Amino acid sequence: MFDGDQATVTAGPWSDGSTRGRLTRLPRVFALGGDVRRALVLTLVWEIVGEVVGWAASSLILPDKADLNATLARHMFPGQHLSHFESIWVRWDGNWYGLLGTAGYGSHVSNLDAFFPAYPLLIHVGGVLLGGRYLVAAILINRLLLFPTVVLFMKLVARDEPGDGRETELAPLMILLIPGAVFFLGALTETLFVFACLAAMLAMRRERWLAAAAACALATGTRLPGVVLVGTLALELLLRREWLKAVYCSAIGMLGLGLFALYTLVTQHDLLAFKHAYQYGSWNDQTFTLNVLRGPLRYAHELVHYPPTHGYGGIVTLRYLVALLAVVVLAALCFRRLSWPLRFFVVGTALIPLLSGSMFSYYRYAMIPLLPMMVLATRWLSTRPVWRDSAVLALAGVAIFDIMAFTSGHWVS
């Protein structure tokens, strides 16, 4: 799947077309003891650091004057006193997910239908278990899922052949500090979706097709780009000439989106409510287009007329464009080292947000196509100490800045 993964014999997408036979053994699983304990410690330390930085930033930095998060929260949850913990980590889309977790979808199509149901369903279950603290549940779900997400990334990074394990030592830091890591800590879908993507990739690497399909179903029930993950699984099986498996695994993988569409058909009489939701709320300026350059060109024009020196809005625009540039550059560097299914995954998840004619929230979206390339980057950096330390420091600096901005009410998305 990734360059350097060692199986035995057969041609297939895992080895970029080299002449090999069918995989006859499972990939090596690294010893879980020390690696997993270290991952757990690093995850807990990072969550504590994020909490301390967020608390300090929200107390010391003046919020953006245009930030309506507090007003929105009071309107959505009248009569509830939000703790400081809730108010700094439940922002923007997090409020909508919290509302869905408490009240569900309405009887008519609205902007709420743009948010897929898997995460709100978990919020509802968690909120009931916590005695009605749905917003706390929204945050804690991501904090609890972060550790298994880190472990999955470690397993993907671990090579099949025996080694010194340096890549698995670096892996937790690389996923915890991935650009956009702040979204792992807030009430957003990144942790759940990344968990599903990594689980599917690992299952495909081990030829556990039903497990991969189940992970795809979780992904399509969480966010629309999950359909690209289903396509990745289908392409993997088609390249192996497993035609029937490709059909039924794809069908299972699409269950998340399919059940959501069926639900909105029954309750709102609209099979495509998740698409029509973009006609409402702040998304009404986003229209489907095949011109994927429309958004980048529009935002580049805005950056020229409103650079970062003119205010925080320029920083946000620059972040979107840099995120896209990073995906393009890394994809070009890593393209030959990825299997065809992963190439499809990278290109598909990078392009789907651009089909809206906008780059709105592209910093969040860019995390997903970066995942396979972060696996390769972790392996490469693990043998180059100077580059490794520089990369970790740079990523940590960006992550700290994002946490400070997010928790103090400045737009990060």
Image (cartoon, rainbow, N blue to C red):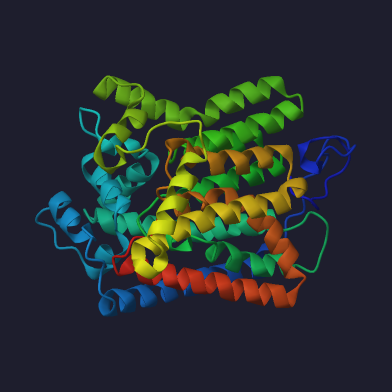
Residue 322 visible in the current orientation? yes
Residue 383's image quarter? bottom right
Depth order, front residue of 232/249: 232
| Rendered location of residue 20, percent (x, y) | 89, 38
Q: Where is residue 357 in the image (x, y as percent from the top left)?
A: 43, 38
* Label tally: 0
Left or right position of 128 against 286: left
In the rendered image, the vertical position of residue 17 relative to residue 254, given as above or below: below
Q: Which of 114 and 24 is in front in this view?
A: 114
Q: Which residue is drawn at 21% across and 41% down?
A: 103
Q: Can residue 155 be seen in this view?
A: no
Indicate the position of residue 12 as horizontal and vertical percent values.
Answer: 80, 35
The single residue placed furthest to the left in the displayed view is 79
Q: Does 116 sit above or below residue 76?
A: above
Give left or right: position of 348 versus 59.
right
Tell me residue 314's x, y (percent): 39, 62
Compared with 261, 192 (above or below) is: below
Q: Which residue is drawn at 74% across and 49% down?
A: 2
